Amino acid sequence: MIARHQLIRLNAAGWARAAGQAASAEASLCLRHWADQGLPVVVTRQACQAVPGDGGVSVGIAAPLQWGRVRVPLLVRQSDIAYFDGFPEAKLACRLMPREDRSAWQALFQALSSAGLRCRVYGSFGWQLLTDLAYLHPGSDVDLLVFVGGPEEADVAAGLLGQHGRLGLAPRVDGELVFGNGSAVSWREWLSWRAGTTASILVKSAHGVALADSLVFTQRRWVESPELSVA
């Protein structure tokens, strides 16, 4: 099952095909570095078009600062995929935090873990951990993926994130709650919706976005892990 924010490692044939999809000089330089280093691409919202007979997958690269933070969209074949991967565990982001704030972030990640919640970091912090390239800038948020089994776990996760957010630390904590069927919502919007402040909530999936006004979207189950699959 393809899921948003899932990472993919391409094989040699995949990188050869990807090289021809660069739309700018920055994208071409970025793609060359990614291929040379064997860095991952990330699953994005799935496009309507597909590679005939081979199930095209929409992926992309978020380039670092040195290539202008351009987005590099790609369409790869199933046969281009060597294996699937995931963004780093969230606790690893502590090494990129201001030293004086690390204990507060460590406390958040420990609280999530103690509640039985898996958490990964994506966005600028995730890409910098993956690549050792410079992504962080003064406006960078800490984007977290918290995997939840249902509404009760989502309430716990959003509550812990909200409690941390009220500390007023920079960078700001942001991100999504990811349910078992791959549906994802902003944790901030979840808090507002559950409090009755809003009548509906924006739900994201690999194939689009939709507004929901009930918990039906949370009820299906995964056949595979929402983070990692075996190609």
Image (spheres, rainbow, N blue to C red):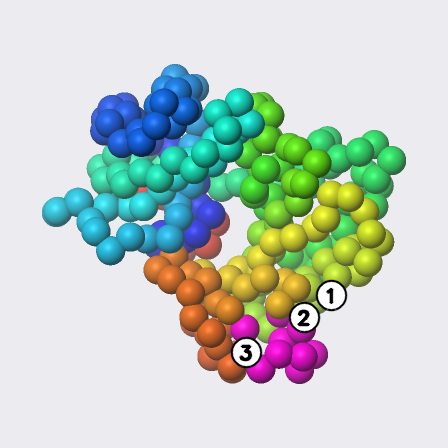
Residue at which label 3 appears: 200
Is 26 situated above or below 84? above
In the image, is 155 to the left or to the right of 19? right
Q: Nearer the viewer, mark 1 or mark 2?
A: 2
Which residue is at 24% across, 27% downward?
20
Q: Is residue 31 visible?
A: no
Q: Give the CA distance from mark 2 to mark 3.
A: 12 Å
Is 199 a magenta residue?
A: yes
Closer to the chain start, of discs 3 and 1, is: 1
Is 82 situated above or below 42? above
Residue 191, image x, y percentages: 67, 70
Is 8 situated above or below 187? above
How many numbered marks have been drawn onto this rendered protein structure? 3
Q: Nearer the viewer, residue 214 or 220?
A: 214
Say few, some or many: other residues with alpha carbon within 10 Å of mark 1 (under 14 / 14 to 19 / 20 or more). some
Say few, some or many: other residues with alpha carbon within 10 Å of mark 3 (under 14 / 14 to 19 / 20 or more). some
Q: Give the CA distance from mark 3 to mark 1.
A: 19 Å
Which residue is at 75% across, 61% downward?
162
Is 212 situated above or below 83? below
Q: Nearer the viewer, residue 49 or 159?
A: 49
Is 21 a magenta residue?
A: no
- Whether pointer 1 and pointer 2 mark residues with C-beta atoms closer than 8 Å, the reply is yes
Residue at which label 1 appears: 159
Residue 191, numbered label: 2
Q: Which residues are magenta?
A: 190-201
| Kind of residue at disc 3 | Ser
Closer to the chain start, of discs 1 and 2, is: 1
Q: Give the CA distance from mark 1 to mark 2.
A: 8 Å
